[in-house]
Amino acid sequence: MSDQQRLVNLHRQGLLNADLAKELNLSLATVKRWKKRLQLGVNCPDNLLGRQGERFVLAEAGRLSLPASHSGPHHHPYDLMIAGQRVDVKTASYSPAYSGWRFRLPRERSSFYSSARRTPKAYERDCDWLALVGLSRVERVPAFLHFVRPAATLTNVTLHPADFPGGFTANWGDTDLTTSLRPAA
C-alpha cells in the first residue's frame, strides 16, 4: 500500500496532521500538501465547528423555505447567502470561563503562511448579518441561533443563558431575511 493510500486510511480514522506525519514518517508540510492534493478535509473538532454552524443555519433557512446557499470558497468575506443577504456564521462552544458563549470577531484574517499575508476583515462591509450559533454544553450540537447586525466596534460577542429568559430561539423575525420571501405555510 502506498504512503498516500495509508494517509487516506489514517485520515478516515480521524488522525490529525501531526499524528499523520508521525505515523507515516513524513514532514508536516508533506502531509498538508498531500491532503490538499487528495482533497481531504480537516479532522480537528475545533476547526469543524464553523462548518457545523453553517450547516445548521442552512438547514434552518431551508426549514423556513428561505433561499440559501454557500457563498463560495474558503476565506470568502461571508459564509452564506440567505434571501439575498450576506450572512457570516460564527460558531462557539459553551465556555464555563464566560458562563456563556463567546464569539470572537477578529479584525483580520490570519494566514498560516506568514503574518504579512493577513487580510483585513470588516464585518460591517463584508456581510449584512452575523449568525451566532451556540453549541450545547455536552453534546456540542447547535443549541441556539441568534442574528446580530455587524458593527465596526464589535470585536467579541458574549451571550449568556440569562440573556434569553424565554429560552433560546432563532430571532429570524428580528431580521429582514424573512421579508423577501415569506416562509411556506
Image: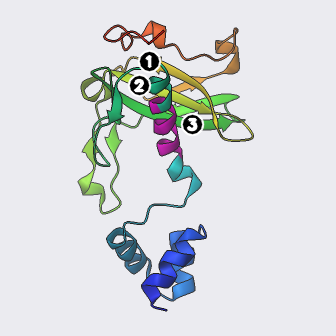
In the image, what residue occupies the spot 47% across and 44% down?
A: 51
Q: Give the alpha-carbon distance from disc 2 to disc 1, as whole Å.
A: 5 Å
Left-right relation of 134 to 156 = right
Residue lying at the far bottom of the rendered structure = 1
The residue closer to the viewer here, 61 or 46, is 61
Tell me the quarter of the picture where residue 76 sits.
top left
Q: Which residue is mark 3?
A: 92
Neighbours of disc 3 within 10 Å: few (<14), some (14-19), many (20+): many
Q: Which residue is mark 1?
A: 148
| Label 3: which secondary element | strand
Neighbours of disc 1 within 10 Å: few (<14), some (14-19), many (20+): some
Does the CB distance between marks 2 and 1 fall below 8 Å?
A: yes
Q: Position of residue 156 (x, y in %)?
A: 48, 29
Q: Which residue is mark 2?
A: 130
Q: Earlier in the sequence, mark 3 or mark 2?
A: 3
Neighbours of disc 2 within 10 Å: few (<14), some (14-19), many (20+): many
Left-right relation of 70 to 105 = left
Q: Position of residue 129 (x, y in %)?
A: 37, 21
| Dominant SS in magenta | helix
Residue range in magenta is: 49-58
User: Does the rendering let one see residue 15?
Assistant: no
Q: Is residue 3 above or below residue 62?
A: below
